[in-house]
Image: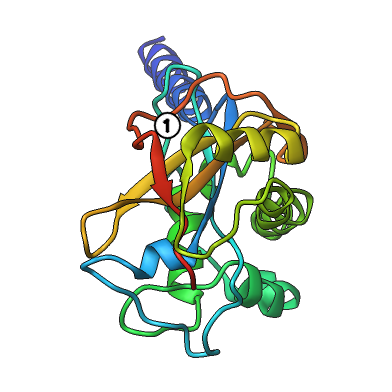
């Protein structure tokens, strides 16, 4: 009986462990984050173009991040499921165009995509396997043409200043959902348009209104730097 009781306790502990592991990988929505390369590069830190050359003057993907409705987020959910380049080989050229690295020293994107998958992607692996995760982000970018939405409202990456409300309004009108705008500071200390957050349902396929926005704020008027 002692052996059976001991085995039962071990089994219950094991089941509890897996239930906790499963819960830790649940999430409520994704942030789909695109960054403006002109703002990434126009800082004290500067940038390095990828080994494939200067990216196009367009918003590029930063990440697809699982989040909770309370504003917190899971991360690094499965160390046993590392990034494998072979799993996204058919997406590589599209990733290099739409999800380029701007970090120094220059790279081919592998390190960036590895970080994004292992920190964020593994937390949605119950819904999106590695290939599906990157493919979902590429599809979302096609559906959310930020540059076009801004241009339609007369907002261009010309180094000029625009009101934060007009930028938000242009994206809301063009995409259909309210964005969160993240700013950074250029070399002269001016606030500038850096990243745009849109929210996506847990399937990774449909935009939704954001349940919560990140902390932080921009000025009422921000620059849209050229690239």
Residue under the image location 64 percent in, 68 percent down = 98
Left or right of residue 139, residue 202 in this image: left
Q: Split into 4 quadrants, where in the image is the N terminus?
A: top left
Q: Nearer the viewer, residue 52 or 163?
A: 163
At x 60%, y 29%, the residue is 29
Looking at the image, residue 45 lies above or below residue 195: below
Residue at (39, 26) in percent of width and height: 72
Q: In the image, residue 115 lies at what x, y percent?
A: 42, 61
In the figure, residue 153 lies in which quadrant? top right
When the figure is inspected, residue 193 is found, relative to residue 177, above or below; the finding is: below
Secondary structure of the residue carrying tag 1 is loop
Q: Residue at x 72, y 72 (%)?
A: 91
Q: How is the image coloured?
A: rainbow
Residue designated by label 1: 73
In this rendering, the count of numbered labels is 1
Percent from the top left, x then y, of residue 192? 38, 52
Nearer to the camera, 227 or 61 = 227
Residue 80 in sight here:
no
Task: Give whichever of 176, 76 is nearer the camera.
Answer: 176
Q: Is residue 94 above or below residue 219?
A: below
Residue 67 can be seen in this image:
yes
Q: Position of residue 36 (x, y in %)?
A: 50, 60
Q: Is residue 196 left or right of residue 172?
A: left
Tell me which corner region of the image, top left, top right, bottom left or bottom right, holds residue 4. top left
Res. 204 image quadrant: top right
Q: Residues within 10 Å of mark 1 (few under 14, many from 20)?
A: some
């Amino acid at each position: 009986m002692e052996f059976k009781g001991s085995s039962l306790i071990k089994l219950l502990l094991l089941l509890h462990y897996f239930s906790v592991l499963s819960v830790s990988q649940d999430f409520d929505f994704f942030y789909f984050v695109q960054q403006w390369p002109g703002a990434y590069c126009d800082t004290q830190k500067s940038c390095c173009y990828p080994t494939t050359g200067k990216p196009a003057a367009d918003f590029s993907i930063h990440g697809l991040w699982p989040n909770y409705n309370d504003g917190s987020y899971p991360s690094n959910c499965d160390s046993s499921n590392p990034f494998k380049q072979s799993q996204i080989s058919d997406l590589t050229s599209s990733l290099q165009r739409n999800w380029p690295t701007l970090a120094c020293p220059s790279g081919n994107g592998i390190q960036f995509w590895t970080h994004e998958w292992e920190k964020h992607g593994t937390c949605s692996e119950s819904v999106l396997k590695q290939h599906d995760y990157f493919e979902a982000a590429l599809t979302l970018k096609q559906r959310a043409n930020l540059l076009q939405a801004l241009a339609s409202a007369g907002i261009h990456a010309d180094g000029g200043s625009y009101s934060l409300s007009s930028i938000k309004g242009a994206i809301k009108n063009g995409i259909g959902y309210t964005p969160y705008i993240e700013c950074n500071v250029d070399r002269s200390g001016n606030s500038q348009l850096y990243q745009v957050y849109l929210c996506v349902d847990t399937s990774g396929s449909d935009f939704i209104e954001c349940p919560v926005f990140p902390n932080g704020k921009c000025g009422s008027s921000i620059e849209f730097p050229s690239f």
